[in-house]
């Protein structure tokens, strides 16, 4: 994924599956402590960043990974905390697909 040029559209299904796998590996006590918040996951390293809003989670991730694609979702049971639109990908700064959906 790191070598994929930004002018080539990523496979969103694969990225989403990878993001969900990484999310599933986050310790349960961290998930419980951040229920209803957002988590930004850098997909190559697996490092994750929590925030009260999507923007806060992304900003936290940008300090370590300014030009990387991050997977964002609500923390907890998606059906409980939000709609199906609770999963998002945000590209690095100055990238053609800054927000994929």
Image (cartoon, grey):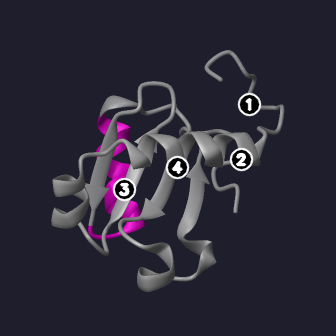
Horizontal and vertical percent position of residue 86 = 54, 71
Question: Which residue bears the numbered disc 2?
Answer: 97
Disc 2 and disc 1 in contact, CB within 8 angstroms: yes
- Which residue corresponds to the image point at 31% horizontal and 75% vertical from the top-left? 36
Q: Is residue 29 visible?
A: yes
Q: In the picture, which quadrant includes the N terminus? A: top right
Say which element carries label 1: loop
Which sits earlier in the primary sequence, circle 3 or circle 4?
A: 4
User: For the residues carrying marks 2 and 4, which lies nearer the camera in this image?
Assistant: 4
- Which residue corresponds to the image point at 58% horizontal and 39% vertical from the top-left? 18
Q: Which mark is residue 39?
A: 3
Which sits earlier in the primary sequence, circle 1 or circle 3?
A: 1
- Neighbor class of circle 4 (other Cα within 10 Å; few <14, some 14-19, many 20+) is some
Q: Is residue 87 left or right of residue 34?
A: right
Question: Which residue bears the numbered disc 4?
Answer: 20
Question: Which residue bears the numbered disc 1?
Answer: 6
């Amino acid at each position: 994924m790191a070598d994929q040029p930004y002018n080539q559209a990523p496979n969103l299904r694969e990225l989403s599956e990878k993001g969900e796998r990484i999310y599933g590996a986050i310790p349960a006590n961290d998930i419980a402590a951040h229920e209803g918040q957002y988590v930004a996951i850098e997909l190559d390293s697996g490092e994750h960043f929590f925030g009260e809003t999507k923007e806060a989670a992304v900003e936290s991730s940008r300090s370590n990974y300014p030009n990387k694609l991050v997977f964002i979702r609500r923390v907890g049971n998606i059906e409980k905390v939000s709609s199906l639109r609770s999963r998002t990908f945000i590209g690095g700064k100055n990238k053609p697909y800054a927000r994929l959906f």
